[in-house]
Image (cartoon, rainbow, N blue to C red):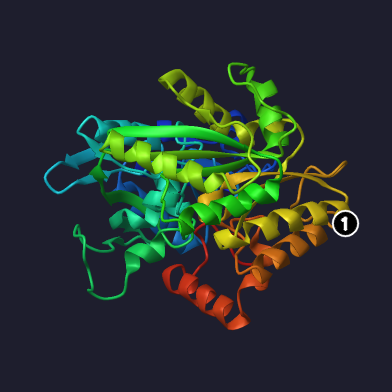
Amino acid sequence: MNRYGLQDWVTAFAEIVGKEFVFTENEDLETVARDHTEDLHFLPELLLKPRTPEEISAILRLCNQHHIPVTPRGAGTGLSGGALATKGGIVLSTERLNTIIHIDTDNLQVITEPGVITEVLQNAVKEKGLFYPPDPSSKGSCFIGGNIAENSGGPKAVKYGVVKDYVLNLQVVLPTGEIIWTGANVLKNATGYNLTQLFVGSEGTLGIVTQIVLRLIPHPKHELLMLVPFKKLEEAGAAVSAIFRAGFIPSVLELVEMDALKIVRDYIGETSITLDETMAGHLLIEVDGQDPDFLLREMEGIVGVLEFFECGEILFAEDPSQKEALWKWRRRVSEAVKASGYSIEEDTVVPRAALPDLIKGVKALGVQHEFDAVCYGHAGDGNLHVRIRKTGHPFSLNNPAVIPALRDLFKLVHQLGGTISGEHGIGLIQKEFMDIVFDPIALVRMKQIKNVFDPNNILNPGKIFQ
Protein backbone atom coordinates (compact mmCIF):
# COMPACT_ATOMS: atom_id res chain seq x y z
CA MET A 1 0.00 0.00 0.00
CA ASN A 2 1.51 3.27 -1.09
CA ARG A 3 1.40 6.16 1.34
CA TYR A 4 0.66 8.37 -1.66
CA GLY A 5 -3.08 8.71 -1.96
CA LEU A 6 -3.69 7.29 1.53
CA GLN A 7 -6.64 9.61 2.06
CA ASP A 8 -8.34 8.13 -0.99
CA TRP A 9 -8.09 4.68 0.60
CA VAL A 10 -9.39 6.04 3.89
CA THR A 11 -12.42 7.40 2.06
CA ALA A 12 -13.00 4.13 0.20
CA PHE A 13 -12.83 2.00 3.34
CA ALA A 14 -14.93 4.48 5.32
CA GLU A 15 -17.73 3.90 2.80
CA ILE A 16 -17.57 0.21 3.70
CA VAL A 17 -17.14 0.16 7.50
CA GLY A 18 -17.91 3.74 8.54
CA LYS A 19 -15.48 6.58 9.12
CA GLU A 20 -15.19 5.85 12.86
CA PHE A 21 -13.80 2.38 12.17
CA VAL A 22 -10.93 3.44 9.91
CA PHE A 23 -7.79 4.32 11.86
CA THR A 24 -4.68 6.07 10.56
CA GLU A 25 -3.14 7.78 13.58
CA ASN A 26 0.08 6.27 14.96
CA GLU A 27 -1.45 6.01 18.42
CA ASP A 28 -4.12 3.66 17.05
CA LEU A 29 -1.77 1.76 14.75
CA GLU A 30 0.61 1.10 17.63
CA THR A 31 -2.09 -0.95 19.36
CA VAL A 32 -1.78 -3.59 16.62
CA ALA A 33 1.94 -3.28 15.91
CA ARG A 34 2.90 -5.97 18.43
CA ASP A 35 1.69 -9.33 19.68
CA HIS A 36 3.17 -11.62 22.37
CA THR A 37 6.00 -12.87 20.13
CA GLU A 38 9.35 -11.79 21.55
CA ASP A 39 9.27 -7.98 21.18
CA LEU A 40 8.61 -7.57 17.47
CA HIS A 41 7.11 -4.38 16.04
CA PHE A 42 5.51 -3.81 12.63
CA LEU A 43 3.36 -0.74 12.02
CA PRO A 44 0.55 -1.05 9.43
CA GLU A 45 -0.66 1.87 7.35
CA LEU A 46 -4.33 1.41 8.18
CA LEU A 47 -6.38 -0.36 10.85
CA LEU A 48 -9.92 -1.40 9.91
CA LYS A 49 -12.61 -2.72 12.27
CA PRO A 50 -15.46 -4.19 10.21
CA ARG A 51 -18.63 -5.59 11.78
CA THR A 52 -20.05 -8.04 9.21
CA PRO A 53 -18.88 -10.68 6.74
CA GLU A 54 -20.22 -8.46 3.94
CA GLU A 55 -17.99 -5.59 5.05
CA ILE A 56 -14.98 -7.90 5.16
CA SER A 57 -15.88 -9.20 1.71
CA ALA A 58 -15.96 -5.67 0.29
CA ILE A 59 -12.62 -4.84 1.91
CA LEU A 60 -10.93 -7.95 0.52
CA ARG A 61 -12.33 -7.45 -2.98
CA LEU A 62 -10.86 -3.97 -3.07
CA CYS A 63 -7.54 -5.05 -1.59
CA ASN A 64 -7.26 -8.02 -3.95
CA GLN A 65 -7.92 -5.78 -6.93
CA HIS A 66 -5.17 -3.37 -5.91
CA HIS A 67 -2.76 -5.89 -4.32
CA ILE A 68 -2.94 -4.36 -0.83
CA PRO A 69 -1.63 -6.62 1.97
CA VAL A 70 -4.20 -7.51 4.63
CA THR A 71 -3.24 -8.95 8.02
CA PRO A 72 -6.16 -10.45 9.96
CA ARG A 73 -5.95 -9.90 13.70
CA GLY A 74 -7.85 -11.15 16.73
CA ALA A 75 -6.74 -10.30 20.27
CA GLY A 76 -3.04 -10.22 19.41
CA THR A 77 -2.02 -12.91 21.93
CA GLY A 78 -0.17 -15.04 19.39
CA LEU A 79 3.36 -16.33 19.93
CA SER A 80 4.60 -16.78 16.36
CA GLY A 81 4.09 -13.32 14.84
CA GLY A 82 1.09 -14.39 12.79
CA ALA A 83 -0.92 -11.20 13.44
CA LEU A 84 1.86 -8.74 12.61
CA ALA A 85 1.70 -6.59 9.48
CA THR A 86 5.17 -7.43 8.23
CA LYS A 87 4.34 -6.16 4.73
CA GLY A 88 2.58 -2.99 5.87
CA GLY A 89 -0.82 -2.39 4.36
CA ILE A 90 -3.93 -3.05 6.43
CA VAL A 91 -4.59 -4.76 9.72
CA LEU A 92 -8.16 -6.08 9.73
CA SER A 93 -9.40 -6.55 13.28
CA THR A 94 -12.19 -8.99 14.09
CA GLU A 95 -12.87 -7.49 17.53
CA ARG A 96 -16.33 -6.20 16.55
CA LEU A 97 -17.48 -9.65 15.41
CA ASN A 98 -18.03 -10.55 19.05
CA THR A 99 -21.46 -12.21 19.31
CA ILE A 100 -22.32 -15.71 20.47
CA ILE A 101 -25.09 -16.29 17.95
CA HIS A 102 -26.74 -19.44 19.29
CA ILE A 103 -26.16 -22.18 21.87
CA ASP A 104 -27.96 -25.31 20.69
CA THR A 105 -28.56 -27.43 23.80
CA ASP A 106 -30.41 -30.11 21.83
CA ASN A 107 -27.52 -30.84 19.46
CA LEU A 108 -24.70 -29.71 21.79
CA GLN A 109 -23.38 -27.05 19.44
CA VAL A 110 -22.63 -23.34 19.53
CA ILE A 111 -22.48 -20.84 16.68
CA THR A 112 -20.19 -17.92 17.43
CA GLU A 113 -18.40 -15.04 15.78
CA PRO A 114 -14.58 -15.02 15.91
CA GLY A 115 -14.14 -11.97 18.16
CA VAL A 116 -15.60 -13.67 21.23
CA ILE A 117 -13.08 -14.21 24.04
CA THR A 118 -12.49 -17.92 24.55
CA GLU A 119 -13.24 -17.90 28.27
CA VAL A 120 -16.42 -15.89 27.69
CA LEU A 121 -17.57 -18.60 25.28
CA GLN A 122 -16.64 -21.35 27.74
CA ASN A 123 -18.55 -19.65 30.56
CA ALA A 124 -21.60 -19.08 28.37
CA VAL A 125 -21.90 -22.74 27.41
CA LYS A 126 -21.08 -23.86 30.96
CA GLU A 127 -24.22 -22.07 32.15
CA LYS A 128 -26.10 -24.54 29.95
CA GLY A 129 -24.20 -27.50 31.43
CA LEU A 130 -21.96 -27.77 28.35
CA PHE A 131 -18.21 -27.82 27.85
CA TYR A 132 -15.85 -26.43 25.23
CA PRO A 133 -12.52 -27.95 26.36
CA PRO A 134 -9.68 -26.18 24.44
CA ASP A 135 -8.23 -23.74 26.97
CA PRO A 136 -4.99 -21.95 26.00
CA SER A 137 -3.21 -20.09 28.79
CA SER A 138 -4.45 -16.80 27.31
CA LYS A 139 -8.08 -17.95 27.33
CA GLY A 140 -9.10 -14.89 29.37
CA SER A 141 -8.05 -12.56 26.55
CA CYS A 142 -7.57 -14.52 23.30
CA PHE A 143 -10.35 -14.70 20.69
CA ILE A 144 -11.94 -17.92 19.51
CA GLY A 145 -11.11 -16.90 15.92
CA GLY A 146 -7.42 -16.78 16.76
CA ASN A 147 -7.73 -20.22 18.32
CA ILE A 148 -9.18 -21.45 15.02
CA ALA A 149 -6.32 -19.85 13.09
CA GLU A 150 -3.66 -21.53 15.24
CA ASN A 151 -5.49 -24.79 16.08
CA SER A 152 -4.92 -24.02 19.75
CA GLY A 153 -4.78 -26.64 22.46
CA GLY A 154 -3.97 -26.01 26.09
CA PRO A 155 -3.80 -28.24 29.18
CA LYS A 156 -7.10 -30.05 28.58
CA ALA A 157 -5.99 -31.25 25.13
CA VAL A 158 -4.42 -34.40 26.57
CA LYS A 159 -7.88 -35.86 27.21
CA TYR A 160 -10.21 -33.79 25.08
CA GLY A 161 -8.23 -32.84 21.98
CA VAL A 162 -7.51 -29.48 20.36
CA VAL A 163 -9.60 -26.93 18.48
CA LYS A 164 -9.79 -28.98 15.27
CA ASP A 165 -11.62 -31.72 17.17
CA TYR A 166 -14.55 -29.37 17.89
CA VAL A 167 -14.97 -27.38 14.67
CA LEU A 168 -17.87 -28.60 12.55
CA ASN A 169 -18.33 -25.76 10.08
CA LEU A 170 -16.90 -22.35 9.23
CA GLN A 171 -18.13 -19.31 7.39
CA VAL A 172 -15.09 -17.84 5.63
CA VAL A 173 -14.45 -14.77 3.51
CA LEU A 174 -11.90 -15.66 0.85
CA PRO A 175 -9.11 -13.26 -0.17
CA THR A 176 -10.96 -12.66 -3.44
CA GLY A 177 -14.09 -11.61 -1.52
CA GLU A 178 -16.39 -14.64 -1.85
CA ILE A 179 -18.19 -15.82 1.29
CA ILE A 180 -18.43 -19.60 1.71
CA TRP A 181 -19.38 -22.23 4.27
CA THR A 182 -16.81 -25.01 4.48
CA GLY A 183 -18.93 -27.92 5.72
CA ALA A 184 -22.15 -28.72 7.58
CA ASN A 185 -23.40 -28.58 11.16
CA VAL A 186 -23.22 -32.34 11.59
CA LEU A 187 -20.97 -34.74 13.49
CA LYS A 188 -20.14 -36.90 10.47
CA ASN A 189 -19.36 -35.57 7.03
CA ALA A 190 -17.78 -37.45 4.12
CA THR A 191 -18.93 -34.96 1.49
CA GLY A 192 -16.14 -33.62 -0.68
CA TYR A 193 -12.78 -32.32 0.47
CA ASN A 194 -12.56 -31.34 4.13
CA LEU A 195 -12.25 -27.59 3.71
CA THR A 196 -13.15 -27.01 7.33
CA GLN A 197 -10.01 -28.70 8.60
CA LEU A 198 -7.94 -27.00 5.91
CA PHE A 199 -8.84 -23.61 7.34
CA VAL A 200 -8.30 -24.65 10.96
CA GLY A 201 -4.66 -23.92 11.70
CA SER A 202 -4.08 -22.03 8.44
CA GLU A 203 -3.02 -18.94 10.39
CA GLY A 204 -5.19 -16.47 8.51
CA THR A 205 -3.44 -17.11 5.20
CA LEU A 206 -6.35 -18.68 3.27
CA GLY A 207 -9.39 -16.71 4.42
CA ILE A 208 -10.96 -14.76 7.26
CA VAL A 209 -13.29 -16.79 9.47
CA THR A 210 -16.51 -14.89 10.30
CA GLN A 211 -18.72 -17.58 11.88
CA ILE A 212 -17.79 -20.78 13.68
CA VAL A 213 -19.87 -23.85 14.52
CA LEU A 214 -18.41 -25.86 17.40
CA ARG A 215 -19.52 -29.15 18.90
CA LEU A 216 -19.79 -29.27 22.70
CA ILE A 217 -19.86 -32.01 25.31
CA PRO A 218 -21.47 -32.27 28.77
CA HIS A 219 -19.47 -30.37 31.39
CA PRO A 220 -17.65 -32.60 33.90
CA LYS A 221 -19.02 -32.09 37.41
CA HIS A 222 -15.92 -33.02 39.42
CA GLU A 223 -12.15 -32.83 39.18
CA LEU A 224 -9.20 -33.76 41.39
CA LEU A 225 -5.81 -32.03 41.10
CA MET A 226 -2.35 -32.81 42.45
CA LEU A 227 1.18 -31.45 42.12
CA VAL A 228 3.94 -34.09 41.98
CA PRO A 229 7.63 -33.12 42.48
CA PHE A 230 10.48 -35.08 40.86
CA LYS A 231 14.17 -35.13 41.72
CA LYS A 232 15.11 -35.39 38.03
CA LEU A 233 13.38 -33.62 35.16
CA GLU A 234 13.85 -36.63 32.88
CA GLU A 235 12.08 -38.77 35.48
CA ALA A 236 9.07 -36.48 35.28
CA GLY A 237 9.09 -36.93 31.51
CA ALA A 238 9.33 -40.70 31.82
CA ALA A 239 6.45 -40.81 34.31
CA VAL A 240 4.16 -39.20 31.72
CA SER A 241 4.38 -42.16 29.35
CA ALA A 242 4.10 -44.63 32.24
CA ILE A 243 0.79 -43.13 33.37
CA PHE A 244 -0.76 -43.67 29.95
CA ARG A 245 0.70 -47.15 29.56
CA ALA A 246 -1.00 -48.04 32.84
CA GLY A 247 -4.35 -47.19 31.29
CA PHE A 248 -5.03 -43.75 32.78
CA ILE A 249 -6.02 -40.66 30.75
CA PRO A 250 -5.80 -37.55 32.92
CA SER A 251 -7.67 -34.42 31.88
CA VAL A 252 -4.46 -32.46 32.55
CA LEU A 253 -0.85 -33.59 32.64
CA GLU A 254 1.47 -30.58 32.71
CA LEU A 255 5.21 -30.41 33.31
CA VAL A 256 6.91 -27.36 34.83
CA GLU A 257 10.63 -27.15 35.56
CA MET A 258 11.58 -25.93 39.05
CA ASP A 259 13.36 -22.83 37.73
CA ALA A 260 10.14 -21.82 35.96
CA LEU A 261 8.08 -22.40 39.11
CA LYS A 262 10.41 -20.25 41.20
CA ILE A 263 10.25 -17.49 38.61
CA VAL A 264 6.45 -17.48 38.48
CA ARG A 265 6.22 -17.67 42.30
CA ASP A 266 8.31 -14.53 42.66
CA TYR A 267 6.59 -12.82 39.73
CA ILE A 268 3.04 -13.20 41.02
CA GLY A 269 3.89 -13.13 44.73
CA GLU A 270 2.08 -16.40 45.38
CA THR A 271 3.32 -17.93 48.65
CA SER A 272 0.42 -20.18 49.66
CA ILE A 273 2.17 -23.21 48.16
CA THR A 274 5.58 -24.27 49.49
CA LEU A 275 8.14 -25.52 46.99
CA ASP A 276 10.91 -27.99 47.77
CA GLU A 277 13.66 -26.32 45.76
CA THR A 278 15.79 -29.48 45.79
CA MET A 279 13.36 -30.91 43.23
CA ALA A 280 13.99 -30.51 39.49
CA GLY A 281 10.44 -30.26 38.22
CA HIS A 282 6.78 -30.98 38.81
CA LEU A 283 3.86 -32.65 37.09
CA LEU A 284 0.45 -31.04 37.52
CA ILE A 285 -2.07 -33.87 37.15
CA GLU A 286 -5.86 -33.56 37.02
CA VAL A 287 -8.63 -36.10 36.49
CA ASP A 288 -12.22 -35.08 35.83
CA GLY A 289 -15.61 -36.62 35.18
CA GLN A 290 -19.08 -37.20 36.56
CA ASP A 291 -18.41 -39.78 39.30
CA PRO A 292 -16.24 -38.58 42.25
CA ASP A 293 -15.65 -42.11 43.57
CA PHE A 294 -14.32 -43.25 40.19
CA LEU A 295 -12.04 -40.18 40.02
CA LEU A 296 -10.62 -40.94 43.47
CA ARG A 297 -9.79 -44.49 42.40
CA GLU A 298 -8.22 -43.17 39.19
CA MET A 299 -6.05 -40.71 41.10
CA GLU A 300 -5.00 -43.47 43.51
CA GLY A 301 -4.02 -45.59 40.51
CA ILE A 302 -1.88 -42.80 39.09
CA VAL A 303 -0.16 -42.36 42.44
CA GLY A 304 0.57 -46.10 42.35
CA VAL A 305 2.35 -45.63 39.02
CA LEU A 306 4.39 -42.72 40.42
CA GLU A 307 5.74 -44.91 43.23
CA PHE A 308 8.20 -46.35 40.69
CA PHE A 309 9.82 -42.92 40.23
CA GLU A 310 11.89 -40.63 42.44
CA CYS A 311 9.10 -38.33 43.61
CA GLY A 312 8.89 -35.99 46.54
CA GLU A 313 5.85 -35.29 48.68
CA ILE A 314 2.70 -35.03 46.56
CA LEU A 315 0.44 -32.04 47.12
CA PHE A 316 -3.27 -32.81 46.72
CA ALA A 317 -5.36 -29.69 46.11
CA GLU A 318 -7.98 -30.12 48.79
CA ASP A 319 -10.09 -27.03 48.24
CA PRO A 320 -10.94 -24.56 45.44
CA SER A 321 -8.41 -21.99 46.66
CA GLN A 322 -5.52 -24.45 46.32
CA LYS A 323 -6.72 -25.47 42.87
CA GLU A 324 -6.95 -21.83 41.86
CA ALA A 325 -3.43 -21.15 43.16
CA LEU A 326 -1.95 -24.09 41.24
CA TRP A 327 -3.66 -23.06 38.03
CA LYS A 328 -2.57 -19.47 38.51
CA TRP A 329 1.02 -20.65 38.67
CA ARG A 330 0.70 -22.76 35.55
CA ARG A 331 -1.15 -20.24 33.42
CA ARG A 332 1.26 -17.41 34.14
CA VAL A 333 4.50 -19.31 33.64
CA SER A 334 5.03 -18.05 30.10
CA GLU A 335 4.42 -14.44 31.07
CA ALA A 336 6.70 -14.70 34.11
CA VAL A 337 9.67 -16.36 32.44
CA LYS A 338 9.50 -13.92 29.52
CA ALA A 339 9.57 -10.99 31.96
CA SER A 340 12.66 -12.50 33.59
CA GLY A 341 14.59 -12.52 30.32
CA TYR A 342 13.64 -15.83 28.70
CA SER A 343 12.28 -14.00 25.68
CA ILE A 344 12.57 -16.72 23.00
CA GLU A 345 9.89 -19.43 23.21
CA GLU A 346 9.84 -22.57 21.10
CA ASP A 347 6.76 -24.79 20.87
CA THR A 348 8.24 -28.26 20.38
CA VAL A 349 6.27 -31.49 20.31
CA VAL A 350 7.44 -35.11 20.29
CA PRO A 351 5.85 -38.51 20.96
CA ARG A 352 5.33 -38.46 24.72
CA ALA A 353 7.71 -41.38 25.32
CA ALA A 354 10.48 -39.24 23.80
CA LEU A 355 10.06 -36.44 26.38
CA PRO A 356 13.04 -37.53 28.53
CA ASP A 357 15.33 -37.47 25.49
CA LEU A 358 14.00 -34.07 24.44
CA ILE A 359 14.53 -32.58 27.90
CA LYS A 360 18.05 -34.01 28.11
CA GLY A 361 18.79 -32.73 24.61
CA VAL A 362 17.56 -29.21 25.38
CA LYS A 363 19.92 -28.98 28.35
CA ALA A 364 22.85 -30.26 26.28
CA LEU A 365 22.14 -27.75 23.52
CA GLY A 366 22.05 -24.98 26.11
CA VAL A 367 25.62 -25.85 27.09
CA GLN A 368 26.74 -26.19 23.48
CA HIS A 369 25.20 -22.92 22.28
CA GLU A 370 25.57 -20.98 25.53
CA PHE A 371 21.95 -20.32 26.40
CA ASP A 372 19.83 -20.90 29.48
CA ALA A 373 16.54 -22.75 29.04
CA VAL A 374 13.50 -23.54 31.15
CA CYS A 375 10.98 -26.15 30.11
CA TYR A 376 7.26 -26.42 30.75
CA GLY A 377 4.16 -27.40 28.85
CA HIS A 378 1.61 -30.03 27.98
CA ALA A 379 3.60 -33.14 28.77
CA GLY A 380 0.63 -35.44 28.23
CA ASP A 381 0.74 -34.46 24.56
CA GLY A 382 4.53 -34.44 24.34
CA ASN A 383 4.20 -30.67 23.79
CA LEU A 384 7.14 -29.00 25.54
CA HIS A 385 7.56 -25.23 25.54
CA VAL A 386 11.24 -24.29 25.69
CA ARG A 387 12.00 -20.76 26.86
CA ILE A 388 15.51 -19.56 25.97
CA ARG A 389 17.64 -16.77 27.41
CA LYS A 390 20.84 -15.90 25.59
CA THR A 391 22.74 -12.92 26.92
CA GLY A 392 22.63 -9.96 24.56
CA HIS A 393 20.20 -11.68 22.17
CA PRO A 394 16.54 -11.21 23.18
CA PHE A 395 15.19 -12.04 19.71
CA SER A 396 15.37 -15.03 17.39
CA LEU A 397 14.03 -13.42 14.20
CA ASN A 398 16.85 -13.03 11.67
CA ASN A 399 19.40 -13.37 14.48
CA PRO A 400 22.51 -15.28 13.32
CA ALA A 401 23.61 -15.74 16.93
CA VAL A 402 20.43 -17.68 17.79
CA ILE A 403 19.32 -19.40 14.57
CA PRO A 404 21.99 -22.18 14.63
CA ALA A 405 20.89 -23.16 18.14
CA LEU A 406 17.24 -23.28 17.06
CA ARG A 407 18.07 -25.34 13.99
CA ASP A 408 19.86 -27.86 16.20
CA LEU A 409 16.89 -27.90 18.58
CA PHE A 410 14.41 -28.52 15.77
CA LYS A 411 16.64 -31.17 14.20
CA LEU A 412 16.64 -32.96 17.54
CA VAL A 413 12.86 -32.70 17.74
CA HIS A 414 12.53 -34.12 14.21
CA GLN A 415 14.95 -36.96 14.97
CA LEU A 416 12.77 -37.86 17.96
CA GLY A 417 9.74 -38.14 15.68
CA GLY A 418 8.30 -34.71 16.50
CA THR A 419 7.72 -31.38 14.84
CA ILE A 420 8.42 -27.70 15.40
CA SER A 421 5.05 -26.43 16.61
CA GLY A 422 2.29 -28.09 18.58
CA GLU A 423 -0.09 -25.17 19.05
CA HIS A 424 1.57 -21.78 18.50
CA GLY A 425 1.81 -22.03 14.72
CA ILE A 426 4.60 -21.14 12.30
CA GLY A 427 3.75 -17.53 11.54
CA LEU A 428 6.75 -15.31 11.03
CA ILE A 429 9.47 -16.65 13.29
CA GLN A 430 9.41 -20.38 12.52
CA LYS A 431 9.04 -20.34 8.76
CA GLU A 432 12.75 -20.65 8.00
CA PHE A 433 12.78 -24.02 9.81
CA MET A 434 9.98 -25.64 7.83
CA ASP A 435 12.55 -27.43 5.65
CA ILE A 436 13.60 -29.49 8.66
CA VAL A 437 10.24 -31.26 8.95
CA PHE A 438 8.88 -31.19 5.37
CA ASP A 439 10.19 -32.52 2.09
CA PRO A 440 10.52 -29.88 -0.66
CA ILE A 441 7.58 -31.31 -2.61
CA ALA A 442 5.32 -31.03 0.46
CA LEU A 443 6.23 -27.36 0.84
CA VAL A 444 5.58 -26.79 -2.87
CA ARG A 445 2.11 -28.33 -2.59
CA MET A 446 1.29 -26.18 0.45
CA LYS A 447 2.32 -23.04 -1.42
CA GLN A 448 0.15 -24.13 -4.35
CA ILE A 449 -2.84 -24.45 -2.02
CA LYS A 450 -2.16 -20.92 -0.77
CA ASN A 451 -2.05 -19.69 -4.37
CA VAL A 452 -5.41 -21.30 -5.22
CA PHE A 453 -7.17 -19.39 -2.46
CA ASP A 454 -5.07 -16.23 -2.59
CA PRO A 455 -3.63 -15.78 -6.10
CA ASN A 456 -2.37 -12.25 -5.41
CA ASN A 457 -0.89 -13.15 -2.01
CA ILE A 458 -2.64 -10.34 -0.17
CA LEU A 459 -3.82 -12.23 2.93
CA ASN A 460 -1.28 -12.42 5.76
CA PRO A 461 1.63 -12.47 3.33
CA GLY A 462 5.05 -13.50 4.57
CA LYS A 463 3.75 -16.05 7.05
CA ILE A 464 4.38 -19.83 7.24
CA PHE A 465 6.54 -19.98 4.08
CA GLN A 466 9.84 -18.39 3.14
Q: Residues within 10 Å of mark 1 (few under 14, many from 20)?
A: few
Is the residue 399 above or below the residue 439 in the image?
Answer: above
Instruction: Give the x, y percent position of residue 295.
Output: 34, 39
Is the residue 233 above or below the residue 292 in the image?
Answer: below
Q: Residue at x 41, y 51 (%)?
A: 249
Q: Describe residue 40's horizontal placement relative to residue 147 as left or right.
A: right
Is the residue 40 above or below the residue 191 in the image?
Answer: above
The picture quadrant where one finds residue 129 is top left
Tell me the kind of residue under disc 1: Gln
Q: Residue at x 19, y 46 (%)?
A: 108
Instruction: Please indicate, yes or no, whether residue 216 appears anywhere in the rendered image.
Output: yes
Q: Residue at x 70, y 40 (%)?
A: 231
Instruction: Please indicate, yes or no, whether residue 423 appears anywhere in the rendered image.
Output: no
Instruction: Give the x, y percent position of residue 119.
Output: 38, 33
Q: Nearer the viewer, residue 422 or 100?
A: 422
Q: Nearer the viewer, residue 1 or 129?
A: 129
Q: Describe residue 301's horizontal placement relative to residue 399 as left or right.
A: left
Q: Nearer the viewer, residue 360 or 129?
A: 360
Instruction: Give the x, y percent position of residue 147.
Output: 44, 47
Is the residue 84 above or below the residue 365 in the image?
Answer: above
- In the picture as drawn, the residue positioned furthest to the left comes out as 106
Pick the quarter of the image with the C terminus: bottom right
The picture quadrant where one finds residue 391 is top right
Instruction: Give the x, y percent position of residue 246.
Output: 45, 56
The number of discs equals 1
Q: Secondary structure at mark 1?
A: helix
Q: Which residue is mark 1?
A: 368
